[in-house]
Amino acid sequence: MLRHQFEHLVAAAANVVEADEFVVIGSQAILGPCPEAPGSLLRSLEVDIYPSDDPTKADLIDGALGDGSQFHRSFGYYAHGVGPETAKAPAGWRERLIRVDVPPRLNSSRRPVAWCLEPHDLVLAKCVAGRERDWQFARDALAAGLVNTDTLAARVSDLPVRIELNGPSAGCSPLSTSASDQPTHRAGMTRDTPSPRASAHAVAAPADVVDGEEPEVADPASSPSGCCHGAGQLGRDRLSHAAACSAQSR
């Protein structure tokens, strides 16, 4: 996705729901603060978005601009209506959102604004999602210098789920995650979050499994703070290792 396509989607959403301000939380939120982001970060064809004043109207965006819609068939990219609970970003992420003023569509009275996740919050939210493409997004953002390891490590303890930063391993998977098994809800949608052990098993890279043994998964309840521990030097080492791996692969 390119910046003008991102702006097109936001402006179209403004017309659909008759609102001006939106929050963008998926990978393509990077196009807000970093309009010239590397192509490796812009592979997604969707923008995860919701109206800031009334997130329930995200369903209208899905219907008009979503996957398989006429808009998608015409332009090749689409919007995904989500809710604020979808963003598994560090506490305070709303105060760090980056404002992007979007050119309105022709003959439209709307003045669209996209509030995009700040890059460090975005990368950590991707790490919580834990899919291989999310790890790769984090590695590429580090390698491109769009985020730094100190800021990432400092915010890990503010995440709504737990992330283990276990220091460098033989492979290049940057993080392993665990989360509570509580489902999250939005009007018309239920999104199940995997249990801690299932999540860690699914996320762990082959390099993190030695002689067929699964990586150890800590119980979130065992942490006195109820969130992450080890977000200091070990976290920075782990994230720096991820950046080095990404640079070596280029």
Image (tube, rainbow, N blue to C red):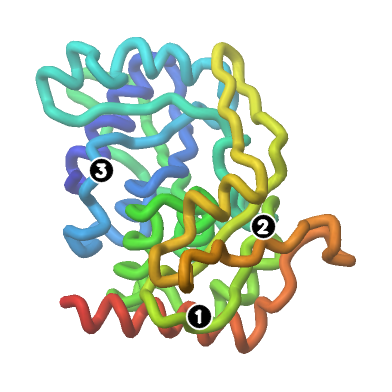
Task: Give the image quarter of residue 135.
Answer: bottom left
Marks 2/3: CA distance? 24 Å
Can residue 98 be seen by looking at this rendering? no
Q: Which of marks 1 and 3 is nearer the N terminus?
A: 3
Query: For the residue marked with disc 3, what is the amino acid?
Result: Ser
Marks 2/1: CA distance? 17 Å
Residue with the mark numbered 1: 238
Query: For the residue marked with disc 2, what is the amino acid?
Result: Leu
The spot of residue 249 in percent (x, y) is 20, 77
Label 2: few (<14), some (14–19) or many (≥20) C-alpha neighbours in 10 Å: many
Labelled pair 1, 3 in contact (Cβ < 8 Å): no
Residue extending farthest left: 74
Give me the residue at 23% from left, 16% from top.
Answer: 68
Residue with the mark numbered 2: 159
Q: Give the vertical position of 92 relative to 115 (above or below).
A: below
Label 3: few (<14), some (14–19) or many (≥20) C-alpha neighbours in 10 Å: few
Residue closer to the observer: 106 or 194: 194
The spot of residue 130 in percent (x, y) is 47, 53
